[in-house]
Image: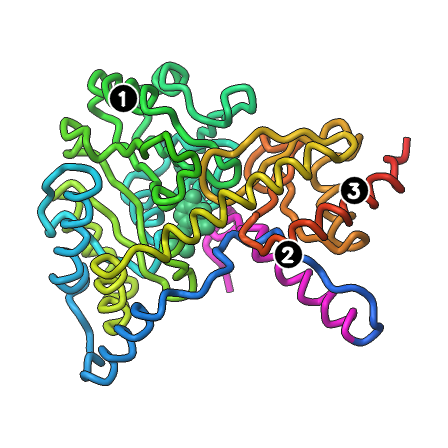
Amino acid sequence: MQIAARMSRLGSESAFEVLARAKAIDMQAAKDGSKSVINLGIGQPDFSTPEHVVEAAVKALRDGHHGYTPANGILPLREAVAADIAARRGVNVSPDTIVIVPGGKVTMATAIQMFGEPGGEIMYPDPGFPIYESLVKFTGAEARGYPLLEKDGFAFRADDLLARITPRTRLLIVNSPANPTGGVAPAEEVAKLAAGLAKHPHVALMSDEIYSRLVLDDDKPYASFIPYTHLHDRLIVLDGWSKTYAMTGWRLGWGMWPSHLADLATKLAINVHSCVNAAIQFAGIAALQGPQDAVETMRRAFQRRRELTVAGLNALPGVSCIRPEGAFYAFPNITGTGFNARQLQDALLEQARVATIAGTSFGQHGEGYLRLSFAADDAAIAEALQRIGTWLGENKPKK
Ligand code: PLP
């Protein structure tokens, strides 16, 4: 038996590995009476999906929506996405440019497979969502991580990105608000990048906007790439329901594609998953067209927890943390503790029993940082910070 060589180039997402280790520790803790793990590792809202969305899925099942749907998604859902884009971004797009997929990740996988091959280069953020690098390497394309720096609030600088483009660059991936840092690209940098890309017509852009409804500063409207219509013939926008409507387990996402690429993305869908679960597409319509108060309730909770988390982290010895402007992640600098990211992640999980993710899980420029998700209730965050503080007070790195 010989497995294809590209399988050895696949990476993974440490959050899932840490979750499994935390569960194993919890099982042991249940037996020996020791304390269980507080999980600040996993990146998903700790809220339930709004009730009217759940009801829409149940109704769709009862109404008999049990069969295959068009591979790119049912038309009413694609129309609802196009209407949402018109309302939020002020741009009219055809529902035919929307491809419904089982989770935002699938738009990412489709775009990277569409552009990645040996000889080409794909640029992506470092630290960044680990699946970008994993999939780029899987395709055999050259993986060109670009650094995101604490001094820039972990936001990209358009001039830096434009300077890194080569004749072999096929695809540029940007993500704002960002996982794992919570960095948000300032509107002027988004505008500058959009304008600068006019000089590089061979480069496609994938803007991962999955956290676009989770900008935490009220005075900063979200800067999307969708309003830059001169890019529409090479812009792919990744968005979806997972983070906005607390629907990570439903597996529902949408991509906005240039018309000619939407057909290719659909062809890939036909080859891989046929279509998204029929009933869940009706839930997606209910989410977009129904009341949005649950989204705002969650955003307010994340705002409050951000303050709690950042203040708590900055009070810890050897730790400093800038304020994340979006998503629900804090990315503290831990260099002052003397531990590297992986050492601290492992020790905090096993000894302090707090699950966090080493910054290096998101790229080499994540060394010296940890990711903490504040998608957890206030009491859990406070307790976790206290446990980390106690552990840091009692432990110094071995020389
Ligand atoms: N993009 C980023 C930056 C993410 O953090 C995630 C999930 O964590 C995704 C995309 C994928 O989202 P989904 O769960 O909808 O596949």
Label 3 CA crowd tier, 10 Å (few <14, some 14–19, many 20+): some
**Mark closest to the chain's N terminus, 2 or 1:** 2
Residue at mark 1:
191
Which image quadrant is residue 164 in?
top left
Tell me which amino acid carries mark 3.
Answer: Gly
Callouts 1 and 3 close, C-beta under 8 Å: no
In the rendered structure, the answer to whether residue 20 lies left or right of residue 276 reads right
Residue 40 drawn at (x, y percent): 62, 52
Tell me which amino acid carries mark 1.
Answer: Ala
Separation (CA) of disc 2 from disc 1: 37 Å
In the rendered structure, the answer to whether residue 36 lies left or right of residue 45 reads right
Residue at mark 3:
389
In the rendered structure, the answer to whether residue 123 lies left or right of residue 363 reads left
Closer to us: 79 or 11: 79
In the rendered structure, the answer to whether residue 243 lies left or right of residue 394 reads left
| 270 in relation to 262, above or below | below
Describe the element under mark 2 as helix, strand or loop: strand
Residue at 21% in and 35% down: 226
Describe the element under mark 1 as helix, strand or loop: helix
Residue at 37% in and 24% down: 186
Residue 291 drawn at (x, y percent): 27, 59
Residue 144 drawn at (x, y percent): 44, 29
Magenta residues (range)? 1-30
Residue 105 visible (yes or no)? no
Separation (CA) of disc 3 from disc 2: 16 Å
Callouts 2 and 1 close, C-beta under 8 Å: no
Residue at mark 2:
39
- In the rendered image, residue 12 lying in the magenta stretch gets the answer yes
Nearer the camera: disc 1 or disc 3: 3
